[in-house]
Amino acid sequence: MLHENVLKFSRFRYLKWMTLLVLGSVIAYVWDQPETVPNGGTWLGYTLGTIGALMILWLMLFGVRKRAYRSRLGSVKGWLSAHVYMGVALVVVATLHTGFQFGWNIHTLAYALMMAVILSGMWGIYVYFRNPALMSGVLDGKTLQDLGGTLRELDARSKRLAGKLSPDLQALVARSAEAAIVGPLFGRFRAQVMACPTRRAVATLEPLARQDDRAVRDLYALQFQRLSILDEIRSFVRLKAWTDLWLLVHVPLSFALLATLTAHIVAVFFYW
Amino acid sequence: MQHHDDPIAAEIKRLQRPLGGRRLLSWLLFVSAIGLCLLLPVAGSDHAEDLKALIAKVPGLAEYVNPQIDRVQARLTGRRHDPAVTDPASRKTHDDRVAQPAPGTYVTPPPTVLALDRVWNPGPLAAAHQSWAHDCKVCHSAPFTRVMDKDCKTCHAGVGDHVPTDAGAVHGIADQRCADCHHDHQGSFALAAQNLHYVGRECADCHRNIKLALPATHTEDVADFATQHPEFRVQVAAAPPDTKLSRVRPAAGETLQEPTGLKFPHDVHLSDKGIDSPRGEVHMECANCHVLKQDGLAFEPVNMKDHCASCHALKLEPAMSNREVPHGDVPAVLTAVREFYAYVEAMGGLPPDAAPLSHTIKISRPGEAERPAQSFLKAPGNARERASAAATELFEKTSCVVCHEVSRVPDAGLAGTPGQDLPQWKIAPVQAAHTWMPKSVFDHASHANQSCTDCHAAERSDKATQVLMPKINICRDCHAGATPVANKVTSDCGLCHGFHQPARLPSPRAHTAPLPLAVLKRPSGVAIQ
């Protein structure tokens, strides 16, 4: 399992390193007696700030390493393990760098963005722990393509069966076959589709199937099966969408962080 | 067996792709953050006119937008658009000023457009600086340059150096900027707290071995008030008429002497037994003569009229109680005496307003044996001779000589005055009041719960020449050093000393002048210069 390897990688090597870094930072912060209040401008403030900025740059390089398939610079798994622990350690290093001075300015904006990126990363760890098992549970060894094939098969059989029945039922089945798997826009984040034609077909056929017409009963069974498969696909897609979503927050926010961090550093030296 | 036109397969394929938009969103956020947080403030700060010129290129926009920019800018920074300063052609004038700063002509560079750079403000300014919180360039006059001393001195023009500049470059101070030690943007009271911190803790960094920083100094090493602080140097005058003041460190057990030109025994005046005065027996206390100034630091000068004359009347003639000679001017005294006896001779008797004697005139100083006062109304000779005898009595026996060094001189009297034909005397000049410890500030008001004689041994002083400044051990009775001690006042350097000292020693009358503007009052009332 990927997630076990990521956190326990090389016997928690990066957890140990980052614990040392955090402890070192905290001890230095407690030991340091600045002339007034702790802030980013003392020697310790500059040191922690420099370390923090380098950490942010390295953390962002993960996006490059992830894509460099031929790179032999450590395994991606190792990089990810270090990425996770370093990201968490950055909370302490950067917070001590601020000296707990916050305000309505770009410096605190950079800090807030950094915290948002780290929080979204933690969310990412959570979904990586939780969702893959749920997703494979939903599919139960099948692939989406398998389920798609079954849908097509069910649709073909439904169409044949409906050919013998009323035009109303034929239209019902045709609309069911054309039903979209997920709704528009943010549809993939929901397991339900509003006014799903297959669900309507099932609802319409259910009372008819109680009558003693075998063809209708079979059609009902086919449509019921179709709805079940649709629900499986939708649950899977929903889980996958939510699993992907954190990265849509994590990555763009990290670039916003890179921009405000640059502004922070330039501003500090511009009006030194 | 999938078909490319199969909508189900196509949708599944689409759903299997990860969520899109990461790249677009990343670029969007990166570019807008760089633009808003970095490029716009830089452009507004350093390329204000370019920015306005850019706006002006859009037809119709400049007429509306640029006045709005000026209006908002003026509201935020309190500064109006000034073409003379912000004109592109003269934009580099700030750099010119760096080369040739003329005192009083320093002009702060134009403010940033719309005060855009205020988003960079890293923290609250000190209370006194907060009105410029939206106008960074008031202090940060040049980009990528740390705050320069001239930026500070635009307002803080009267602040002195730490060490008089004629003492030479002091290692560790000469190459420091104001802002190396005074860090703003740390909150409303941070600068004051820093000042207290520096004078409290860091003086000893250099002063414990001061010769390393300034080999030529006469200052002795100081580490802590309680454990390593030399005896106070007291500023005393040379013998009059030389008014030169110099700071002298008394040896152990030594009482410094200063020629005052006066005879004043503190012990007699403060005697427990009291003084037999014209108004009966009086018990004097220090405050009868020494009145604290309003600043609570020093005392008003003592003067004859307010502090001496009620006892030390300058009676002209024992037969009259209501005639005195004026104090301070020898020709005026002689004239008064000469005119009086001329009147008596011409009119054949006392003036009509002569009040009869109500009591015996004292001509002996307190504690001395009584002597009868002598009348010259019926003395032999003419009026001039009587006046001469009376003046001699006045100067040499009964009045002037009581407090002053009086010497008879063969000079002629001041021409054109009635007293010119009398013998002449000279009164030794009196040393003017001056500051005793110019390198420290002593707040008498905050010591009001002590009695004066706890520190000044006036009751045992029998000569006016004795300098009654207390020695350091007296202070140490109550004052500990920087380390707290039970029942003592914790005292760091800043309690008595300032950092930015005036360039020269105060003049002899300096303590009557107002304190420098750049005085930071401590809560205790001790001023830090």
Image (cartoon, coloured by chain):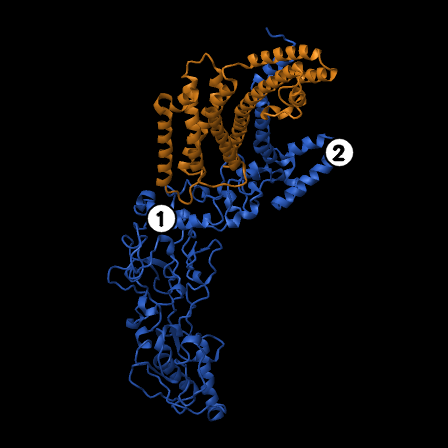
Chain colours: A orange, B blue
Relative to residue B477, is residue B51 drawn left or right?
right
What residue sits right under mark 1 in the picture?
Answer: B201
Q: Position of residue B274 (x, y in %)?
A: 32, 80
**Residue type at numbered disc 1:** Arg
Q: Position of residue B477 (x, y in %)?
A: 29, 62
Q: Is B378 located above or below residue A176 in the figure?
A: below
At x 36% / y 77%, what residue is drawn? B284
What residue sits right under mark 2 in the picture?
Answer: B60
Could you give the CA–CA distance between mark 1 and mark 2, rounded to whole angstroms? 62 Å
Q: Chain of mark 2?
A: B
Q: Are marks 1 and 2 on the same chain?
A: yes
Q: Position of residue A52 (x, y in %)?
A: 44, 31
At x 73% / y 15%, what residue is drawn? A166
Mark 2 closeness class: few <14, some 14–19, many ≥20 residues within 10 Å: few
Residue B6 showing in the rendered view: no
Assign a secondary structure to mark 1.
Answer: helix
Q: Position of residue B391 (x, y in %)?
A: 39, 82
Mark 1 closeness class: few <14, some 14–19, many ≥20 residues within 10 Å: some
Instruction: Of the two numbered discs 1 and 2 on the same chain, state the one appearing first in sequence.
Output: 2
